[in-house]
Protein backbone atom coordinates (compact mmCIF):
# COMPACT_ATOMS: atom_id res chain seq x y z
CA UNK A 1 0.00 0.00 0.00
CA UNK A 2 2.82 2.40 0.85
CA UNK A 3 4.59 1.68 -2.47
CA UNK A 4 1.36 2.27 -4.38
CA UNK A 5 0.83 5.60 -2.61
CA UNK A 6 4.38 6.71 -3.38
CA UNK A 7 3.94 5.77 -7.05
CA UNK A 8 0.75 7.81 -7.27
CA UNK A 9 2.37 10.80 -5.55
CA UNK A 10 5.37 10.54 -7.90
CA UNK A 11 3.03 10.41 -10.91
CA UNK A 12 1.06 13.45 -9.67
CA UNK A 13 4.29 15.40 -9.08
CA UNK A 14 5.56 14.43 -12.53
CA UNK A 15 2.34 15.69 -14.17
CA UNK A 16 2.46 18.90 -12.12
CA UNK A 17 6.07 19.56 -13.18
CA UNK A 18 5.20 18.93 -16.84
CA UNK A 19 2.26 21.35 -16.60
CA UNK A 20 4.43 23.99 -14.92
CA UNK A 21 7.09 23.58 -17.60
CA UNK A 22 4.53 23.95 -20.40
CA UNK A 23 3.07 27.01 -18.66
CA UNK A 24 6.51 28.57 -18.35
CA UNK A 25 7.16 27.96 -22.05
CA UNK A 26 3.82 29.57 -22.92
CA UNK A 27 4.57 32.64 -20.79
CA UNK A 28 8.02 32.90 -22.33
CA UNK A 29 6.43 32.87 -25.78
CA UNK A 30 4.07 35.70 -24.79
CA UNK A 31 6.77 38.12 -23.63
CA UNK A 32 7.66 39.55 -27.08
CA UNK A 33 3.98 40.19 -27.82
CA UNK A 34 3.46 41.82 -24.43
CA UNK A 35 6.47 44.10 -24.97
CA UNK A 36 5.18 45.04 -28.42
CA UNK A 37 1.76 45.87 -26.97
CA UNK A 38 3.41 47.99 -24.25
CA UNK A 39 5.30 50.01 -26.86
CA UNK A 40 2.21 50.44 -29.06
CA UNK A 41 0.09 51.54 -26.09
CA UNK A 42 2.73 54.08 -25.05
CA UNK A 43 2.73 55.50 -28.58
CA UNK A 44 -1.08 55.70 -28.64
CA UNK A 45 -1.11 57.34 -25.20
CA UNK A 46 1.41 59.89 -26.47
CA UNK A 47 -0.85 60.54 -29.45
CA UNK A 48 -3.65 61.37 -27.05
CA UNK A 49 -1.25 63.74 -25.29
CA UNK A 50 -0.48 65.45 -28.59
CA UNK A 51 -4.21 65.78 -29.26
CA UNK A 52 -4.56 67.40 -25.84
CA UNK A 53 -1.83 69.91 -26.66
CA UNK A 54 -3.50 70.63 -30.00
CA UNK A 55 -6.85 71.20 -28.30
CA UNK A 56 -5.18 73.55 -25.81
CA UNK A 57 -3.51 75.55 -28.57
CA UNK A 58 -6.75 75.79 -30.54
CA UNK A 59 -8.59 76.91 -27.41
CA UNK A 60 -5.96 79.59 -26.83
CA UNK A 61 -6.24 80.74 -30.43
CA UNK A 62 -9.99 81.07 -29.91
CA UNK A 63 -10.04 82.54 -26.39
CA UNK A 64 -7.04 84.89 -26.20
CA UNK A 65 -8.13 87.40 -28.87
CA UNK A 66 -11.60 87.62 -27.35
CA UNK A 67 -10.22 88.04 -23.84
CA UNK A 68 -7.77 90.65 -25.04
CA UNK A 69 -10.60 92.56 -26.71
CA UNK A 70 -12.50 92.52 -23.40
CA UNK A 71 -9.40 93.78 -21.59
CA UNK A 72 -8.98 96.65 -24.05
CA UNK A 73 -12.69 97.55 -23.80
CA UNK A 74 -12.48 97.58 -20.00
CA UNK A 75 -9.36 99.79 -20.10
CA UNK A 76 -11.37 102.36 -22.05
CA UNK A 77 -13.93 102.48 -19.29
CA UNK A 78 -11.47 102.42 -16.38
CA UNK A 79 -12.02 98.90 -14.96
CA UNK A 80 -8.50 97.53 -15.40
CA UNK A 81 -7.81 95.12 -12.56
CA UNK A 82 -10.62 92.60 -12.63
CA UNK A 83 -10.37 91.63 -16.29
CA UNK A 84 -6.91 90.11 -15.93
CA UNK A 85 -7.87 87.75 -13.09
CA UNK A 86 -9.99 85.22 -15.06
CA UNK A 87 -7.47 85.17 -17.88
CA UNK A 88 -4.55 84.56 -15.50
CA UNK A 89 -6.49 81.92 -13.57
CA UNK A 90 -7.43 80.05 -16.76
CA UNK A 91 -3.84 80.14 -17.96
CA UNK A 92 -2.51 78.74 -14.69
CA UNK A 93 -5.24 76.12 -14.60
CA UNK A 94 -4.21 74.84 -18.02
CA UNK A 95 -0.52 74.42 -17.17
CA UNK A 96 -1.02 71.11 -15.34
CA UNK A 97 -2.86 69.29 -18.16
CA UNK A 98 -0.38 70.62 -20.70
CA UNK A 99 2.49 69.28 -18.61
CA UNK A 100 0.86 65.85 -18.52
CA UNK A 101 0.28 65.94 -22.29
CA UNK A 102 3.92 66.88 -22.92
CA UNK A 103 5.09 64.03 -20.67
CA UNK A 104 2.92 61.53 -22.57
CA UNK A 105 4.21 62.82 -25.89
CA UNK A 106 7.82 62.52 -24.67
CA UNK A 107 7.24 58.90 -23.63
CA UNK A 108 5.72 58.16 -27.03
CA UNK A 109 8.67 59.74 -28.82
CA UNK A 110 11.05 57.62 -26.77
CA UNK A 111 9.03 54.48 -27.55
CA UNK A 112 9.13 55.30 -31.27
CA UNK A 113 12.79 56.29 -31.63
CA UNK A 114 14.45 54.24 -28.85
CA UNK A 115 12.21 51.28 -27.95
CA UNK A 116 14.95 49.28 -26.19
CA UNK A 117 15.87 52.24 -24.02
CA UNK A 118 12.19 52.79 -23.27
CA UNK A 119 11.79 49.17 -22.16
CA UNK A 120 14.92 49.37 -19.98
CA UNK A 121 13.67 52.54 -18.28
CA UNK A 122 10.21 51.02 -17.85
CA UNK A 123 11.71 47.91 -16.22
CA UNK A 124 13.89 50.09 -13.96
CA UNK A 125 10.76 52.05 -12.96
CA UNK A 126 9.00 48.79 -12.05
CA UNK A 127 11.92 47.63 -9.93
CA UNK A 128 11.95 50.84 -7.85
Image (cartoon, rainbow, N blue to C red):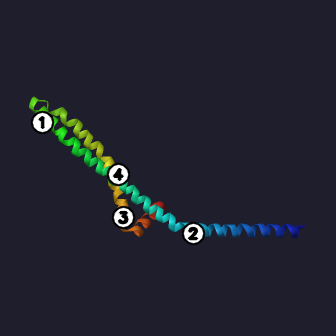
Single out the mark in the foreground, 4 or 1. 1
Name the residue that disc number 3 marks: 110
Compared across the picture, whether 66 is left or right of 44 comes to left
Name the residue that disc number 1 marks: 72
Q: Position of residue 11 (x, y in %)?
A: 78, 69
- Farthest residue toward the right? 1
Compared across the picture, whether 36 is left or right of 54 comes to right
Q: Earlier in the sequence, mark 3 or mark 4?
A: 4
Q: Residues within 10 Å of mark 4 (few under 14, many from 20)?
A: some
Q: CA distance from mark 4 to mark 1?
A: 33 Å
Residue plotted at (36% across, 56% down): 47
Q: Find numbered disc 3 in the image and state the secondary structure of the residue it sits on.
A: helix
Single out the mark in the foreground, 2 or 4. 2
Q: Find numbered disc 4 in the image and state the secondary structure of the residue it sits on.
A: helix
Q: Earlier in the sequence, mark 2 or mark 4?
A: 2
Considering only vertical position in the picture, is 104 above or below 22?
Answer: above
Q: Position of residue 29 (x, y in %)?
A: 56, 69
Name the residue that disc number 4 marks: 100
Q: Earlier in the sequence, mark 4 or mark 1?
A: 1
Q: Residues within 10 Å of mark 3 (few under 14, many from 20)?
A: some
Residue plotted at (26% across, 47% down): 58
Q: Would residue 128 be seen by someone viewing this image from the given angle?
A: no
Q: CA distance from mark 1 to mark 2?
A: 66 Å
Amino acid sequence: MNDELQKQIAEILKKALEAAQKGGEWIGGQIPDALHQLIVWTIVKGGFGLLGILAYVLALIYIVPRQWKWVQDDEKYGDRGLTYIPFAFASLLMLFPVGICISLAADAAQAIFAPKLFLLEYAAHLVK
